[in-house]
Amino acid sequence: MQDLMIGVAKIVLPGILIAIFTSIITVKLSIRKFHEEKWWEKKQQTYSNLLEALHHLKNYASEHYEGQLLRKDMNEEKREELTSDWKKYSRELRKLMDLASFQLSDKAVEILDLYSKEKTEAEQSDDIYDWIDGDLAAVTKCLDNLKIEAKRDLKV
C-alpha cells in the first residue's frame, strides 16, 4: 500500500509542481502585459492631448496671421472665443510639457523644448508681423514633428 502511494506521488507530484510553476509564470506575464498596455494608453493620451492643444494654438496664430496680413477685423465674439481657447490650451500645453519628460520619448521632449525656444524668440520681436509669423511657424513645425515622433514612439 505504501509502495502504491509512493508510486502515485511520483506521478502526481511533478504534474502539480509543473501546474503551479506554469500558473505563476502566466500570471506574472499577464500582469506585465497589463502594465505595458496601461502605460501605452497613458502615453497615447498625452500625445493626443499635446497635439490637440498645439492644434488650437496653431488655429489662434493662423487666425491672427490672416487678420494682420489681410487687414480684416475680427468680430468681438470671435476674438473672445479665440482668446479664451488660447488661454485654455496654453495652460494645458504647459501642464503637458511638464509631464512630457516623464511619459514621452526624449525626442518628443526635444521637439517641445525647441518649440518653447522658437516661440520665446518670436515673442521678442518688436514687429507684430514677425511675432505672429514666428509663432505660427514654431507651432506648425512642432505639430508636424510631434505627429511623426508620436507615431514612432507609439509604433503606430
Image: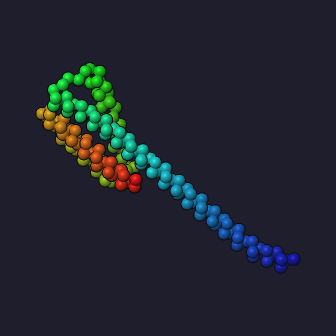
Q: Quadrant of residue 127?
A: top left
From the top left corner, tell me how far across and down residue 105 is, in percent. 35, 53
Instruction: Specify whether 152 is left or right of 116.
Output: right
User: Is residue 152 shown above or below 74?
Assistant: below
When the figure is inspected, residue 76 is found, relative to residue 21, above or below; the finding is: above
Q: Name the image colouring.
A: rainbow
Q: What residue appears at the point 68 percent right and 69 percent down from the top-left corner?
A: 17
Residue at x-position 66% and y-position 65%: 20
Q: Say left or right for 119 vs 12.
A: left
| Residue 120, visible in the rendered structure | no
**Along the viewing direction, whichever of 129 and 28 lies nearer the viewer:** 129
Q: Is residue 156 visible?
A: yes
Percent of width and height locating residue 56: 31, 35
Outermost residue to the bottom: 3
Q: Residue at x 28, y 27 (%)?
A: 83
Report the side of 144 relative to 25 (left or right).
left
Residues 125 and 44: in front is 44
Asked if residue 2 is positioned above or below residue 17 in the image, the reply reads: below
Residue at x 36% of width, y 55% of height: 152
